[in-house]
Image (tube, coloured by chain):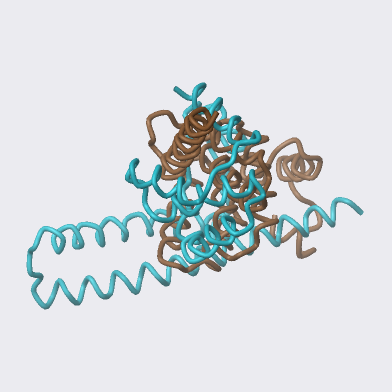
Chain colours: A brown, B cyan
Amino acid sequence: VAKIIRGEAMEPDAETLRKLKAFATGEVTWAEANGVTFEEARAIADIGCDLAAQGRLLEAKVLFEGLVEMNPRDAASRAALGTVYQKLGQLDAAVAEYSAAIGLDPAQPVALANRGEIRLQQRDQGGVEDLIAAAKADPGGATTAGRRARALVEAIAAAGQKAAAAQAQQR
Amino acid sequence: MLGELSGAASQISGSMSLSGKAVDLVASALNLPDPVKDIAKIIVGAFLMDVPGIISGATGLLSEVMEVARTDYWPSANPVRAGAGYAAPHRSRPVPPPGSSTANEAFDRLSSKLSATQKEYDELMDRVASGEKLDQQDQFKLQQLQQKLEQMTRLLSSILKHQHEMALVVIQNLGR
C-alpha cells in the first residue's frame, strides 16, 4: 500500500486494490482494510490511557487520533480522545468526540459523563440528562466517569429535595 | 432510584431557589469530594442564574476539572458493537514477499514486543510493590526496561501517526 501511495508500484494486486477502494468509499475502515483487530487496538488504547495518566497528553493525543482515524466507528476510542482534548482545554473538540461516541453507542458512560459536565459548565441544562444517562449506563459504577456522574446526580437530587422541603416549610 | 433522581433534577431546573450554602450542606452529608461539590454548585447556580454561586463553584472547580476527565478506554459490553470497524480476530493476512517490510508488520512486531516488555516491567514493579528490595542487577534491568518501554511507545506513536497520514493520502489520491 505504501508503495502505491508513493507511486513506486503502478499495478497493485487485485486484493489490495479492492481494499483501497472499499476504504475510499467508506465501506470498510482503515483497520478492517489492514486486518487490525479489536484486541490490537485495545492494547494501543491502554498505552494511550497510561500516557494520559502520566500527563503525556500530546503523545496520548497522537495515539487516540490514530486509533480514531483507523476506526472512526470505535465509540470507546472517540470518548478517550475526547478526554484528552478536554484535558488540553480544547472543549469544543472534546464535545464533538463525546457526541460522536454517543451517536455510535448511546450508553457510552465516559462520553456521557464528561459531555454532561462540560455542558453544565456551559450552563446547558441538557448536561443533567447526560449525567443521568451516564449513571444509567454504568449502574454498577464500573467506570470512574459513571461513579462521578452518579455522585453528581445524587448531589443535585438531594439539593433539590432539601430546597423543596424548605420551600414547603416557608408556605 | 434513577427515576426519582431525574424527577428531583427536574425540580431543580424549575423555579426553586437554592443557595450554594445548602449545596455544601447536602454534599457534606453525602461525603462528596470537594471537586464534586464544586460541580454541584455550578449545576444549581446555573439553573437559578445565581451568578455569585456559579463563580464560587467555578473557582473551586477550575483547578480540579482537568483531573476529573480521566482517560478511560471503555468499550461496549456488546462484542458486536465493540468490534465494529475492526478486522475479525484470527483473520489471515496475505503473506508479504520475502524481504518486504510494511508499516503494518512493524506495528504488529512492535505491539507484540511492547506487550512482552510491559509484562517483564510489571513483574519487577510487583516485586517492588510487595516490599522486596531489588538487587543491583534487577534495578539496572528495571531502568533499562523503563527506557525501552518509552522508546517503543514513541515509535508506536509515530507508526500510528504515519498510518494516519497515509490514510489521508489514499483518500486524496483515490478521490482524483
Q: Would residue A161 appear left or right of A101 to someone viewing this image?
A: left
- Residue ID at (88%, 51%): B175
Q: How many marks?
A: 0
The image position of residue B80, as x and y in percent, is 55, 26
The image position of residue B108, as x and y in percent, is 48, 53
- Residue ID at (42%, 28%): A139
Looking at the image, which is closer to me, B11 or B66?
B11
- Residue ID at (57%, 29%): B81
Instruction: Note whether B6 is above or below A66 in the view shown.
Output: above
**Is any atom of residue B148 visible in this view?**
yes
Residue with the most extreme front position:
A171
Instruction: Note whether A138 is above or below A93 in the view shown.
Output: above
**Is any atom of residue B75 visible in this view?**
no
- Residue ID at (92%, 54%): B176
The image position of residue A12, as x and y in percent, is 76, 50
The image position of residue B131, as x and y in percent, is 8, 62
Task: Answer with the quarter of the image where residue A129 lies.
Answer: top right
Instruction: Note whether A3 is above or below B171 in the view shown.
Output: below
Q: Quadrant of the N terminus of chain B?
A: top left
Residue with the most extreme right position:
B176
Looking at the image, which is closer to me, A150 or B45?
B45
